[in-house]
Amino acid sequence: MESRLKKSHRLIRLVSDIKSAPYLTVEQLLVSHGISRAQFYKDKSSLRELGFEFFWDRHRRVVLSYRKSSANQPQREDLDPYHPFFQDRSLYVEGYACRQKDIRMFRLNRIQDIAFTPIQFTIQEDYSFGQRYRNAFSVFAGKTTEKVVVRFALRIRTYIEETLWHHSQITTRNDDGSLRFEVHVAEPREVMWWAFRWGAGAEIMEPDWLREEAKGEVEKMVMVYGEKMKPRRKEMNKCNE
């Protein structure tokens, strides 16, 4: 049976390590003290009874090596992680980005390395994940919104009507059988990207700047597909000669 003196020495060492190096992981503490995970949690409980409670994995700033989609090399990001979430088949984490001094979102698969720091943080009192993403059509949050209107052809109408795409959506059937789809969202481009999945069955109507941007993208598509179609047309013409 373990002596009281031996246990006291181990608890004192554990407290010393946690206070001097709070960035150590549980696994590192287990190896350093030569104890099992079960014993670690027993010691943690004993320390709590003595008035020393610790949370080694809560509210600690992390340093990320993060590569943006438009960058060739990763860059350092100091982050106070607030909330992980899953959206559109991808995992994200949102938190306070120290360099930008603002709440930002990071996609987990773009994190190439991560390191915990001894710096502890407190989540901002006015932070609410639910409120922040209430205006998001997909993943881009924001406090202000803009109205977006999309016209869907009759053949697409049923697919749009049978699903709640956003809490602000309003659908109206037009006289020609097409559907008017209206939402108020933080990032209008997310609606445009979503509408493109329906091809020629969707038309961006409002706002004007988004309609022009959509037209520009469609024109680029015509150039891409047009260039690829030229060799095929030549081959077909030869076959018909």
Image (cartoon, rainbow, N blue to C red):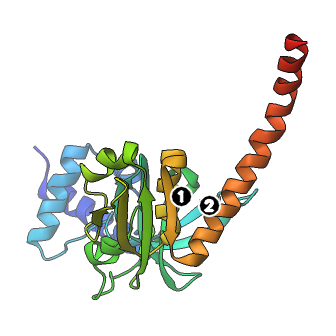
Foreground: 146 or 20? Answer: 146
Q: Quadrant of the C terminus?
A: top right
- Per the image, the residue denoted by label 1 is 114
Which comes sooner in the sequence, label 1 or label 2? 2
Q: How far from the left and from the top, in percent, is residue 67?
A: 65, 58
Q: Nearer the viewer, residue 42 or 240?
A: 240
Indicate the amino acid at tag 2: Ser
Asked if residue 37 lies left or right of residue 192, the reply is left
Residue 64 percent coordinates (x, y): 56, 63
**Quadrant in which the N terminus is drawn:** top left
**Residue at left offset 50%, top offset 69%:** 205
Q: Residue drawn 13% across and 52% down? A: 3
Q: Secondary structure at mark 2?
A: strand
Is mark 1 in CB contact (under 8 Å) with mark 2?
A: yes
Comparing 42 with 179, the one in front is 179
Horizontal side of 4 relative to 24 (left or right) equals left
Give the residue type that dot 1 points to: Ile
- On the image, the x and y values in percent for residue 208 come to 57, 77
Residue to which mark 2 is pinned: 65
